[in-house]
Image: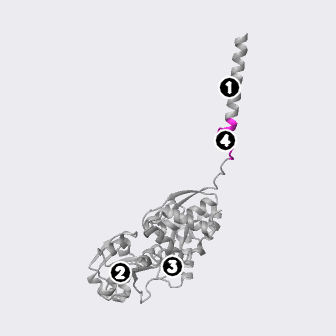
């Protein structure tokens, strides 16, 4: 009888321990008194193209979305515009940063527009009708395409403007991303607007820091640049004057799937509060922190900026 009694007591003890462990697990883990982590509102698949400014802006979006309660699935460094556009239309990503005139000229293949507000309303309407995508508020900085040379190279060849370059191109080597050679807002368009622009050689150097290093090392004479590249001021380069006003304004904004925005309307408010803070000066400075001698990580630069701006909780 005593054996049966002890066996019963032992089974009861095991059952009690099991119940306690079960309760602890339900509260977030055995042996902890911490409250359970809040369940995410939902998952947002975030993409970016393949250069510094896109990485930085995507990291800004990432921190803001996570701070708002979303789980973010990152698919950064996808490639150029065609790759990112294909990814978002397929649903591989829900949003990514895009430039208004890139959307107008490269994606919608519409004629160039000079007025920034008209560019934005045109791409917003076109994307909604053709792709079921929409644009959130654009930032004021203008990352227009440009062409840059070193001070020494500019003086040696007497090139200060696009018109100068169109005539001297046969003596010079160009460095830049492959898509620049074919885009209507790239070399093809420049030839139509200015004539000339037949370079001695064109080297495909991507959109990262490699092309600036190639310029400084003398491997190329001219590089495809962007208005807010940190290296332009950092390396004291000459941005050639677009004397015929070929390039329009390139403001950046989140392009978002409309079904995603319908499901999670708070994405709009979350990202729109960032837009007015990104000016030319701010964006150029953030880019230089990543591409300059400090070589900071885009995520660290983005987080510090958001904390200083008071946008993170």
Task: Kindly report the distance in space between the C-alpha atoms of the residues bearing marks 2 and 4.
Answer: 61 Å
Question: Circles 2 and 4: CB distance less than 8 Å?
Answer: no
Q: Position of residue 258 (x, y in %)?
A: 59, 65
Q: Position of residue 111 (x, y in %)?
A: 46, 82
Q: Secondary structure at mark 4?
A: loop
Q: Which mark is residue 142?
A: 3
Q: Secondary structure at mark 2?
A: loop
Question: Of callouts 3 and 2, which one flags the residue occurring earlier in the amino acid sequence?
Answer: 3
Quadrant in the picture for residue 199:
bottom left
Going by the image, does 116 lie left or right of 294? Answer: right
The numbered mark at residue 62 is: none
The residue under label 4 is: 32
Labels 1 and 2: the sequence-earlier one:
1
Tags 1 and 2 touching, CB below 8 Å: no
First-in-chain label (1 vs 4):
1
Mark 3 or 1: in front is 1
Quarter holding the N terminus is top right
Please provide the residue range marked out in magenta.
Answer: 22-35
Q: Which residue is mark 1?
A: 14
Front residue of 239 and 179: 239
Distance of label 3 from label 2 (alpha carbons) = 22 Å
- Is residue 3 positioned above or below 156 on the image? above
Instruction: Name the chief secondary structure element in magenta.
Output: loop
Q: Are marks 3 and 2 in contact (CB under 8 Å)?
A: no
């Amino acid at each position: 009888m005593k054996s049966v009694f002890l066996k019963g007591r032992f089974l009861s003890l095991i059952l009690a321990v099991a119940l306690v462990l079960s309760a602890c697990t339900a509260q977030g883990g055995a042996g902890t008194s911490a409250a359970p982590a809040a369940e995410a509102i939902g998952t947002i698949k975030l993409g970016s193209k393949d250069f510094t400014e896109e990485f930085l802006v995507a990291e800004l979006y990432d921190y803001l979305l996570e701070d708002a309660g979303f789980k973010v699935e990152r698919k950064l460094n996808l490639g150029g515009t065609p790759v990112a556009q294909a990814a978002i239309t397929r649903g591989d990503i829900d949003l990514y940063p895009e430039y208004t005139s890139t959307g107008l000229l490269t994606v919608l293949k519409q004629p160039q527009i000079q007025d920034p507000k008209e560019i934005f309303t045109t791409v917003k309407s076109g994307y909604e009708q053709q792709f079921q995508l929409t644009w959130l508020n654009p930032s004021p900085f203008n990352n227009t395409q440009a062409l840059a040379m070193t001070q020494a190279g500019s003086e040696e060849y007497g090139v200060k403007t696009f018109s100068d370059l169109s005539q001297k191109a046969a003596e010079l080597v160009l460095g830049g991303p492959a898509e620049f050679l074919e885009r209507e807002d790239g070399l093809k368009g420049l030839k139509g607007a200015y004539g000339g622009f037949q370079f001695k050689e064109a080297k495909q150097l991507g959109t990262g820091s490699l092309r600036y290093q190639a310029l400084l090392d003398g491997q190329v004479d001219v590089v495809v640049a962007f208005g807010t590249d940190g290296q332009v001021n950092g390396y004291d380069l000459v941005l050639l004057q677009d004397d015929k006003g070929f390039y329009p304004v390139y403001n950046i904004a989140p392009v978002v799937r409309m079904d995603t925005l319908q499901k999670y309307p708070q994405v709009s408010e979350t990202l729109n509060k960032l837009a007015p803070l990104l000016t030319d000066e701010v964006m150029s400075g953030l880019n230089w922190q990543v591409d300059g001698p400090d070589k900071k990580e885009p995520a660290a630069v983005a987080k510090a900026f958001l904390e200083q701006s008071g946008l993170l909780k």
